[in-house]
Image (spheres, helix red, strand yellow):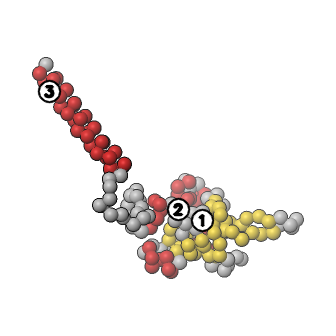
Amino acid sequence: MRNRQIYYASQQTASSQLSGTLSKELRKKYGKRSIRILEGDTVKVIRGEFSGVDGKVTKISISDNGVNIEGVKKDKIKGDKFDVFIHTTNIVITGINSDDKWRMNKLEGKKPRTARDEQPKSDSTKEPKQSDDITIKEEESKKMNTDKIKKSKIKKEEK
């Protein structure tokens, strides 16, 4: 029964099963035990034929239920090499790909949709930027729109 549930699992459910454990340093830093593995993460294989191999994740396959790592290949009889997919339970994440801002916010315990502060905040004594001018113009246009709506309501009541 359980095998059938796994075999017929939806894409979202199968995708969530591809999470890996974090190394001890990352556990202390983020306060999480495991995260979803993405391409570009640095991992170390801890079990199996390729144990001890470090590398970046190059490919994730939900159908093969594993990840492909740089340098992990097997030889065919004819001399060709092919990718080997390693299950995520045999992997420890040692480095995180920080390109995904949503993921990093989620890891750090912030709201995922908020903007990340990459640069230190600047002094507020500087000249107003164009974005400040735009917000002032937007506020003025909102005031004008509310005034128009009020006037139209008053005209309707008079009729």
Position of residue 104 measured from the top left corner of the image (x, y, whole percent): 46, 65
Give yes or no for contact between labels 2 and 3 (Cβ–Cβ under 8 Å).
Answer: no
Q: Circle 1 is placed at which residue position?
A: 40
| Quadrant housing the N terminus | bottom right
- Residue at 14% across / 27% down in the picture? 154
How much space separates mark 2 and mark 1, taking CA atoms? Answer: 9 Å
In primary-sequence order, the first of circles 2 and 3 is: 2
Q: Residues within 10 Å of mark 2 (few under 14, many from 20)?
A: few
Identity, as a three-letter code, of the amino acid under mark 3: Ile
Q: Residues within 10 Å of mark 3 (few under 14, many from 20)?
A: few
Position of residue 148 measured from the top left corner of the image (x, y, whole percent): 22, 30
Residue 106 appears in the figure: no
* Residue found at the far top of this picture: 159
Look at the numbered disc 1 and give the secondary structure of its residue.
loop
- Residue at 45% across / 79% down in the picture? 28
Give yes or no for contact between labels 2 and 1 (Cβ–Cβ under 8 Å).
Answer: yes
Q: Circle 3 is placed at which residue position?
A: 154
Q: Nearer the viewer, residue 107 or 124?
A: 124
- Residue at 70% across / 76% down in the picture? 50
Q: Nearer the viewer, residue 133 or 144?
A: 133
Give yes or no for contact between labels 3 and 1 (Cβ–Cβ under 8 Å).
Answer: no
Position of residue 32 measured from the top left corner of the image (x, y, whole percent): 45, 73
Identity, as a three-letter code, of the amino acid under mark 2: Asp
In primary-sequence order, the first of circles 3 and 1 is: 1
Q: Is residue 69 left or right of residue 146?
A: right
